[in-house]
């Protein structure tokens, strides 16, 4: 194998390793802070409904944490 072929093969291996690193990352499965602020909470018309929405969101997060702990 020539030097250029070895370099090319090493570059491919390095690229595949980087792709594996990206694919092994766990995506965040939640709303972003922007979504929470502007679409989840602020879509509610009154202060009381915004507070209840916050309580429901916290309860949903708690359920998720409990589900993870059961695994």
Image: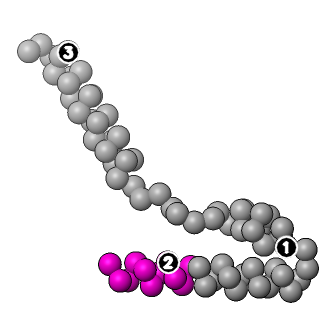
**Real-space Cα distance between discs 2 and 3?**
51 Å
- The numbered dot on residue 65 is none
| 42 to the left or right of 61 | right
> Magenta segment, which residues?
61-71
| 26 to the left or right of 18 | right
Look at mark 3 in the image and give the residue it sits on: 4
Residue at screen point 35% across, 83% down: 70
16 or 38, which is in the foreground? 38
Q: Secondary structure at mark 2?
A: helix
Q: Position of residue 59 (x, y in %)?
A: 61, 85
Look at mark 1 in the image and give the residue it sits on: 44
Looking at the image, residue 5 lies above or below residue 46: above
Residue at screen point 45% across, 84% down: 66
Residue 34 magenta-highlighted: no
**Real-space Cα distance between discs 1 and 3?**
62 Å
Look at mark 2 in the image and give the residue it sits on: 64
Q: Secondary structure at mark 1?
A: loop
């Amino acid at each position: 194998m020539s030097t250029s072929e070895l370099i090319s093969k090493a570059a491919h291996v390095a690229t595949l390793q980087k792709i594996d690193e990206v694919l092994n990352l766990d995506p965040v499965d939640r709303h972003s802070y922007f979504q929470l602020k502007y679409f989840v909470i602020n879509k509610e018309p009154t202060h009381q409904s915004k507070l209840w929405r916050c309580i429901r969101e916290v309860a949903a997060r708690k359920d998720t944490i409990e589900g993870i702990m059961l695994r």
